[in-house]
Each structure stands twice: as C-alpha cells, then as structure tokens.
Amino acid sequence: MTRDRFLRIGSAAGYGIGLAALISLVQHDGGLAIDARSYWLAGRHLIEGQPLYEPVAIDAVGPFRYPPLFAQLWLPLALLPELAFAWAWRFFCFLCLRYLAGSWRNVGLWLLIPLAITELSAANVTLPVGAAILASLRGHPGLAAWAGALKVGGFLLIPYLWWVRPSERRGLALGLATLGAACGVSFLLAPGAWGRYLQSLGWQAVSPLVGGGLIALLPTAAADFGLRLAAGVGITILALLLRSDRLAYVASVATVPTLWLQRLVPILAVFRLPPRPGVSEVTGESRP
C-alpha cells in the first residue's frame, strides 16, 4: 500500500509538472512546436510547389528530413494553421506516450522526467515511432517497416521478428509490402522529390554534429550514425541469440540518424516487454 501511494503521489506531481509546462507552452507563441513546424512546412511546400529539401546542417531547425511519402501523408493536415497543426500533432504524441507508458498513472510518472516534457514540447516523431516499435513487438509486426522508414531502427526489428516469431512473418511481409507500395505511389506522384531526398542524404552525411543535447561520438553525421548503426546491429544479433524482446526494442529505439538525448525517452517502455517470448513480464514465469 505504501508503494502504491508513493506512485500515486509521484504521478500526481508529474501531471502537475506537465500542466505547468502546458501553461508555459501556451504563453510562448501559443504552443508552436519546433519539430512539428518542419512537418507542417513540408506539407505547405508541396501545396505551393516548393522544394522539400535544402542543403542545410543536420541540426538546423525547420528542414524536412524524412522520405517524401510522409510529407504527402501529412499534406491534408498542412491545410490547418500552423498552431492548430502543432497542437494536433502534440496531442497525438501524447496519446503515443500513453501507449508507451501503459497506464495513465505511469504517464504522470514519465512526466517527472524532463526529457519527456522536452519531447512533447518539440513534437517530433520520436514517440509515435517508439509506439510503433513497441506495437511491433506486441502483435503488430507490420508497423516495424513503417517505423524504420522514419527513424531507421524499426528495420532492425524485422530480422529479429522473422526468426524469433515465425508465426508473424505474414504480418512482417504485409508491412513491407504496404510500405513499398506507398513509396511506389509516392515516387510516381513526385519523382523529383525523391531524387532531391536522396541528394539530401548526402548533404546530411557530411554535416558536422553540434548542439546541446545531441549525443555524438564522431564529428560528422554519417560517421556517428555508422557507429551507432553497427552497435544497433550488434545488440540485435545478441537479442536474436538470447531471444530478448527487450534488447531488440532498445536497439531499435536507439538507432536513429541523429541521437538527441530526449529521443531515448521511449526506452522507458522496455520493462513492458517480457524478458523472453513466452515469459510473463510481471512474474517472470513461463506461460503455458
């Protein structure tokens, strides 16, 4: 009872901090979001016939860095005013946080962590991608490919799920097929945007990594990502050997093109996964 009361108090405190952050956001530009702005601008650029990609530093604020498919999917929402778009996307991110946390009480506990507040404020795709990766390990394997198309790490789940869960291969294949079909349609609609996107990858690769909160071990984006990708592959191989959903999840969440500290927030959901397939995440006992 004491532990439960302590957690309830902590959760209430987290919601209090979240409310204070919400008030602060509203008072600052009405609550515009740094990362959501790039998604809104991408849709506006498509509507206005402007290029999606520009040769800017990888840590610059505003440029769109994802495949053109996602700008096209966001396009209807870009018809909204930017402020409305920012809050709609932020609310969706909050729902993804709720899924990752597993309960409303846990949401309050997550909000005690400043990085969670930072991520909600910026409204990146971090929480939706984390939710998709978690869902991939909880019976929806087709989402792994879509998560990978946004943040790369989801692709590491595909070989893991393919070998550890043969019964889910059909779902994996369906996810890859739908992503491939969507990208094909996207290319037919805007082949020039895809060419520009591939060109932008080269611009980003040579970009120096600077900025507060950015975790970088090597000086350029390509070198740093290559190192982290190699580490992610190594952890995935270990996950395969140990049949560990938790290791596979950590590898997928942490393997992103640029690793800002707040992008590690979804890792908190790792304990919602069982230690191994067929083992209860609560008791640690084998399931029948």
Image (tube, grey):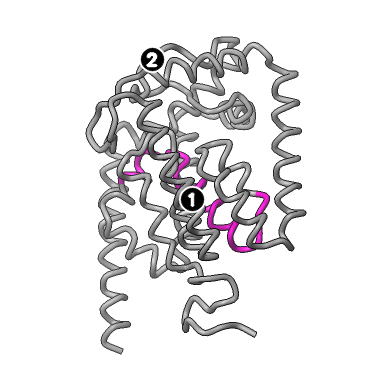
Q: Is residue 188 above or below residue 110?
A: above
Choose top left, top right, bottom left or bottom right for residue 78. Answer: top right
Q: Is residue 127 above or below residue 189?
A: below
User: On the rendered structure, is 219 left or right of 66?
Assistant: left
Is 14 in front, or is 242?
242
Q: Under tag 2, what secondary structure?
A: loop
Q: Residue at x 35, y 32 (%)?
A: 224
* Image position, residue 265 (x, y; %): 37, 52
Are the two marked residues, 2 and 1, in contact with CB atoms closer than 8 angstroms?
A: no
The secondary structure that dominates the magenta segment is helix
What residue sits right under mark 1 in the picture? 130
Q: Amino acid at mark 2?
A: Val
What residue sits right under mark 2 in the picture? 56
User: On the rendered structure, is 168 left or right of 266?
Assistant: right
- Within the magenta stretch, is there residue 228? no
The 10 Å Cα crowd at callout 1, few under 14, some 14 to 19, many 20 or more, is many
Q: Residue at x 35, y 42 (%)?
A: 121
Q: Amino acid at mark 1?
A: Gly
Choose top left, top right, bottom left or bottom right for residue 223. Answer: top left
First to last magenta residue range: 118-142
Q: Residue at x 26, y 70 (%)?
A: 10
Q: Under tag 1, what secondary structure?
A: helix
* Image position, residue 244 (x, y; %): 51, 64
Q: How many marks?
A: 2
Q: Which badge, 2 or 1, is on the more N-terminal residue?
A: 2
* Image position, residue 281 (x, y; %): 49, 75
Q: Is residue 227 above or below residue 50?
A: below
Q: Residue at x 47, y 16 (%)?
A: 202
User: On the rendered structure, is 192 left or right of 185?
Assistant: left
